[in-house]
Amino acid sequence: MTSQPNPAASPETETEPDFVVVDVETACSRVSSICQIGIVGFRNGRETFAYETLVDPRDEFSPFNVGIHGIRPEQVVGQPCFGDIHAAVTGHLAGRITVAHSHFDKGALAAACRIGELPEIETRWLDSVRVAKRAWPELPSHRLNILTSFLGIEHRHHDALSDARAAGMVIVRAIEHTGLGLDGWMTAPARKKIEVPQPATDGPLSGERVAILGEPRDGPLAQFVARAGGRVVASVGMTTTMLVVSTKNPYGRWVRAAPQHRKAQELRDAGRPIAILTEGDLRSRF
């Protein structure tokens, strides 16, 4: 892992990219706690520049996050804080198409700007997860490590520069695979209307408000919940009584890092009566 920006990454000297890709790692559950950032530019399917640096998040490091990316507090001592690199990051992203694998990185940058009272970075975002789902709908998961294995892309998961480079190659391969150009991917397809199953009038889950993690609200698990009398809800909220993790869960062993799981755990810690269980546990009850 390099700890300093690539000198060749200056926006003034690089070839103007078709799109850039950004990835961040965070020190704890607060998305503003950026401790590493990687940015890669692509033009005509080739990498044009790379920028990477460790960042002092001015926040705590949680064992959970350290276990994911391996960055420890002592490694960021003397490194720039986000305010120090804000101008450089803005120079790479502003006014361009910026790819990120899921909305996490977009939210992290916005939060870091907000916490630091810095101008938000104006860019056009493209989610490579959405691109991958359209390009390869047959895959059971579109996590970045699954995609890179499927596509034969060299990748070191949870290293910001490697993740950014890999997500960029997913876009390149999707363009090659489908023939749909970058402008086409920037146009959102018409959304399929989700027909959420209505709960049976009675049943063992009658009165339960159930959020599902890892499967759409019209999938087999939602159908099972509805037949048992449970109402399937869009997300975890104050009135949710149960979070069920689907066996198709795309988060794998990092399921506890999923936003819905985190929210449910926060509600439980605050004393709210919400159950968290797996699909197997739920089905075994009936």
Image (spheres, helix red, strand yellow):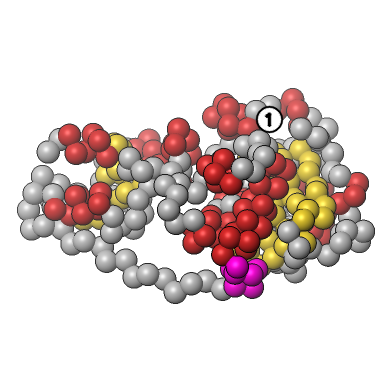
Q: Residue at x 67, y 39 (%)?
A: 154
- Of 4 and 237, the residue lying toward us: 4
Q: Is residue 281 left or right of residue 134?
A: left
Q: Is residue 184 magenta?
A: yes
Give the quarter of the figure containing the C terminus: top left
- Of 153 and 210, the residue lying toward us: 153
Q: Is residue 135 left or right of residue 273?
A: right
Q: Residue at x 38, y 35 (%)?
A: 269
Residue 101 image point, x, y percent? 59, 52
Answer above or below: position of 269 versus 72: below
The tally of labels here is: 1
Residue 35 image point, x, y percent? 70, 39
Give the quarter of the figure containing the N terminus: top right
Q: Amino acid at mark 1?
A: Ile
- Of 275 and 105, the residue lying toward us: 105
- The residue most toward the left is 202
Q: Is residue 74 magenta?
A: no
Q: Residue at x 44, y 56 (%)?
A: 137
Residue 68 appears in the picture as rendered: yes
Residue 100 appears in the picture as rendered: no
Q: Which residue is mark 1?
A: 71
Residue 220 image point, x, y percent? 25, 52
Q: Which residues are magenta?
A: 179-185
Answer above or below: position of 270 versus 71: below
Residue 272 image point, x, y percent? 30, 41
Answer above or below: position of 260 versus 93: above
- Of 161 and 276, the residue lying toward us: 161
Q: Is residue 231 left or right of residue 129?
A: left
Instruction: Describe the element under mark 1 as helix, strand or loop.
Output: loop
Q: Residue at x 75, y 40 (%)?
A: 55
Packing grade of label 1 (10 A; few <14, some 14-19, many >=20) is many
